[in-house]
C-alpha cells in the first residue's frame, strides 16, 4: 500500500473514532508530564518480555539488540505524544507491523504489550492530573490514539502476512505445476524417443512398422500439445465476447470435435422453445469439451451420456449426466480446484478452467455425484433477452 493510500486509510480510521485536532492537542500536552516515566515503562516492558519464551525468542541479538530496541521504543512513545500525526507518522507505524512479520512475532504479543504500555501511561496521567474532567478528556484522547496505532500496526501485520502466505502458496503451486508438467510431458517424450530410435536404427523395417511408429509419434505430440494448450488457456483467458447463441449448436459442434466411442450411448434433449443463451460460444465450447471428456473418461467400459437443457426463469440449465464411476463425497468440493485431479494422468486444470470461464460469462457450475452411479454437471447460463 502506498503512502497516500495509507494516510487516507488512517484518516478514515480517525474519523471513525471521532479523532479531532483537540484530541491531538490534549495528547501533546501530556508529553512533558509523561517524559520522566518513559524509561521506567520501557524497562518494565522488556522485563516482562524476558518472562515469556514465545515473545523472547524473536530477540536473537542479545543485550546489544535489546539496547537498540529500547531506544526505538522510547522514540516511538515520544512520537506518540508529539501531536503530529501526518503521513510519515502513519508509515512508521505501518512498518512496525511489517517488521513483526519479518521477525516472526505473533500479533497477539503486540496487542498485550501495547496494553501493558497503555496501563502504565494512564496510571501516570492519573497521578499528574487532579481535575476529573481534564483527566477524563485526556485519558479518552490517549486511548483513542493508542487504539489507532494498534489498528494501523495490526492492519500492516495482516497485509504483510497475507502477502507472504500468497508468495509461499504461489511457489507451492509453481512446484505442483512443474511436477505435473514433467509427469505429463515426460511420458509422451519417452514414447517419441523410443519410436525415433527404432526408425533410425531398425534394419529394413516393414512399411507397417514405420507407419505404426509414425502414428505413435503423432499421437504423443498431440497429447503433449494438449497439455501445453490447457496450461496456456488457464493462464491467459481473454475477456469473453458475449453474444446470443444456440446452446444445442454449441454442444453439437463440441461433440463433432471430440466424438464419443461406440460403447457410450448419447442422448440429447433440447426443447424447441429453449431461448438462446448469452455468452462467448468459443469459450463455452471449452467448458462443454472438458465436461464431455470427463464423462467419457469416467466410463472406460461404456455407459450412457445424456445432455439436456431446460429454461429456469431468466437462466438456462444445461445438464451433462453420465453413468460413470462417480466422485467420492470427500473429493466433490475440490474437483474445481486448480491442480487437483482424481485421474491417474491429468493436470487437474479442466474443471478449474471451466469454472473460471463460466464466472467470466456470468455462469455457474454445479455438480452432484454418487460413487458407482455417475455424475451430473449443471452449467447455468443467462438466457439472452428476446
Image (cartoon, rainbow, N blue to C red):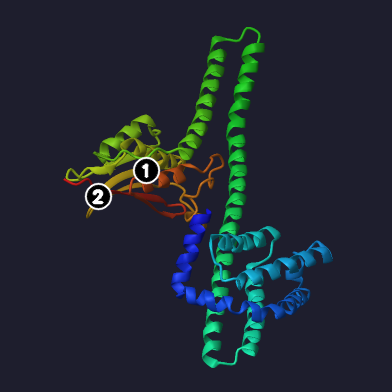
Compare marks 2 and 1 and give the one earlier in the sequence: 1
Image: 164 above or below 138: above
- At x 27% / y 47%, what residue is drawn? 309
Residue 322 lies, in percent from the top left, at: 39, 46
> Which corner quadrant of the image does residue 126 belong to?
bottom right
Give the crowd class for mark 2: few <14, some 14-19, many >=20 residues within 10 Å.
some
Residue pointed to by mark 2: 310
Query: What distance separates the C-alpha of mark 2 from that of mark 1?
Result: 19 Å
- At x 68% / y 68%, what residue is drawn? 75
Decide which of 297, 14 is in the foreground and name it. 14
Residue 154 lies, in percent from the top left, at: 58, 66
Image: 265 above or below 158: above
Image quadrant occupied by the C terminus:
top left
Q: Do the residues labelled 2 and 1 touch (CB within 8 Å)?
A: no
Secondary structure state at the residue bearing disc 2: strand
Q: How many marks?
A: 2
- At x 28% / y 46%, what residue is drawn? 308
Decide which of 380, 332 is in the foreground and name it. 380
Res 304 label: 1
- At x 22% / y 42%, what residue is drawn? 276
Q: In this view, does 370 lie to the left or right of 31?
A: left
Image: 233 above or below 329: above
Q: Can residue 6 be seen in this view?
A: yes
Amino acid at each position: 500500500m502506498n503512502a497516500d493510500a495509507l494516510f487516507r486509510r488512517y484518516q478514515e480510521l480517525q474519523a471513525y473514532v471521532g479523532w479531532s485536532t483537540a484530541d491531538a492537542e490534549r495528547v501533546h500536552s501530556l508529553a512533558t508530564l509523561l517524559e520522566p516515566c518513559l524509561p521506567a515503562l520501557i524497562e518494565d516492558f522488556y522485563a516482562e518480555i524476558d518472562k515469556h519464551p514465545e515473545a523472547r525468542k524473536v530477540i536473537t541479538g542479545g543485550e546489544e539488540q535489546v539496547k537498540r530496541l529500547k531506544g526505538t521504543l522510547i522514540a516511538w512513545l515520544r512520537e506518540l505524544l508529539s501531536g503530529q500525526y501526518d503521513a510519515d507518522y502513519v508509515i512508521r507505524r505501518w512498518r512496525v507491523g511489517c517488521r513483526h512479520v519479518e521477525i516472526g512475532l505473533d500479533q497477539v504479543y503486540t496487542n498485550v504489550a501495547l496494553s501493558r504500555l497503555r496501563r502504565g501511561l494512564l496510571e501516570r496521567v492519573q497521578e499528574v492530573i487532579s481535575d476529573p474532567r481534564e483527566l477524563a478528556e485526556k485519558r479518552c484522547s490517549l486511548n483513542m490514539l493508542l487504539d489507532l496505532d494498534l489498528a494501523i500496526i495490526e492492519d500492516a501485520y495482516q497485509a504483510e502476512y497475507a502477502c507472504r502466505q500468497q508468495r509461499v502458496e504461489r511457489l507451492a503451486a509453481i512446484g505442483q505445476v512443474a511436477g505435473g508438467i514433467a509427469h505429463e510431458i515426460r511420458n509422451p517424450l519417452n514414447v517419441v524417443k523410443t519410436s525415433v530410435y527404432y526408425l533410425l536404427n531398425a534394419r529394413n523395417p516393414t512399411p507397417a512398422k514405420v507407419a505404426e511408429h509414425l502414428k505413435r509419434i503423432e499421437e504423443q505430440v498431440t497429447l503433449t500439445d494438449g497439455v501445453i494448450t490447457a496450461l496456456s488457456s488457464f493462464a491467459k483467458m481473454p475477456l469473453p465476447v458475449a453474444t446470443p447463441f444456440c446452446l444445442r449448436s454449441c454442444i453439437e459442434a463440441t461433440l463433432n470435435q471430440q466424438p464419443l466411442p461406440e460403447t457410450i450411448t448419447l442422448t440429447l434433449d433440447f426443447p424447441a422453445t429453449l431461448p438462446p443463451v448469452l455468452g462467448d460460444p468459443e469459450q463455452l465450447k471449452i467448458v462443454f469439451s472438458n465436461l464431455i471428456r470427463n464423462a467419457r473418461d469416467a466410463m472406460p467400459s461404456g455407459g450412457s451420456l445424456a445432455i439436456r437443457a431446460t429454461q429456469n426463469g431468466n437462466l438456462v440449465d444445461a445438464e451433462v449426466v453420465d453413468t460413470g464411476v462417480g466422485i467420492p463425497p470427500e473429493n466433490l468440493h475440490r474437483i474445481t480446484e486448480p491442480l487437483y485431479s482424481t485421474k491417474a494422468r491429468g493436470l487437474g486444470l479442466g474443471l478449474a478452467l471451466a469454472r473460471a470461464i463460466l464466472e467470466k460469462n456470468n455462469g455457474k457450475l454445479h455438480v452432484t455425484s454418487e460413487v458407482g452411479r455417475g455424475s451430473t454437471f449443471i452449467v447455468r447460463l443467462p438466457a439472452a433477452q428476446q
